[in-house]
Amino acid sequence: MRPFFEMLNTRLAAARTAEEVGNLIGYGARELGFEHWAYGLRLPLPFTRPRFITLSNYQDRWVDRYREQGYISIDPTVIHGRRTPVPQVWSARTFRTTPQLWDEAQSFGLRIGWAQSCFDGGGRIGMLSIARSHQEISPREIRVNDPLWRWLANVAHLELSSRLLGSQAGGEVLLTARQIEVLRWTADGKTSAQVARILGVSEHTVHFHVKNAIARLGAGNKVAAAARATRLGLLDG
């Protein structure tokens, strides 16, 4: 199995598009005994209605149905994945509180599965799900293949997140050092006058940096700018 995944890793590095990466992820999933795969990327913004981007080999009818019914808001695997990077083996028990979702998923061959989320510094969450229509996942299968499943999930996030988002994927909102400094103090609840005293500059200068940071972040005001910068990991360090 190891030579196969070394080969897969090489091909993934050479892939240019999300579709090419997806085909390779599907190839890896099949080698691990799963017919189906899906990758979902949850963006940190906007706060009220985070954006999701998905790619999978699921049947189009199921993808459309899942979207139309808003299942992403009640899907137990998604809820689990938003909270923790701990992998989840899913089956009928996982969906006991969402029987309609479970019944419909089964009709498309999604009966047994495994999923893991990856959290990155930009506030994004990427989750890989691999599923099949038969054969429960045994404890032995978990012992033998769990490291490979985890590897596939991490590679999927690394390779797909950037390709699905293009230049936006890296969260590359560029702020100057002074803008970051001003927003850090703003995030701590300091007023512009207090920030000016702390940094030894005029209040007008603070307003200037705040205004530019708001524009670069696409925020509505300085509080939203500080929150958005924090969520994107721009104030770390």
Image (spheres, rainbow, N blue to C red):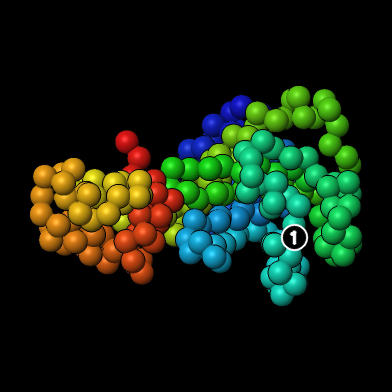
Image point (70%, 62%), residue name: 73
Q: Using the image, determine if residue 225 lies above or below residue 121.
A: below
Q: Nearer the viewer, residue 46 or 92?
A: 46
Q: Position of residue 194 (x, y in %)?
A: 22, 49
Q: Is residue 194 left or right of residue 201?
A: right
Residue 180 visible at all: no
Q: Position of residue 34 (x, y in %)?
A: 76, 45
Q: Using the image, determine if residue 169 lies above or below residue 81.
A: below
Quarter of the image where the N terminus is located: top right
Dividing the picture into quadrants, the one containing residue 61 is bottom right
Image point (87%, 65%), residue name: 100
Residue 100 visible at all: yes
Q: Using the image, determine if residue 165 lies above or below residue 178.
A: below
Which amino acid, mark 1? Ile
Q: Position of residue 165 (x, y in %)?
A: 44, 59
Image point (53%, 46%), residue name: 157
Q: Nearer the viewer, residue 94 or 178?
A: 178
Image point (80%, 44%), residue name: 90
Dividing the picture into quadrants, the one containing residue 57 is bottom right
Q: Nearer the viewer, residue 214 or 173?
A: 214
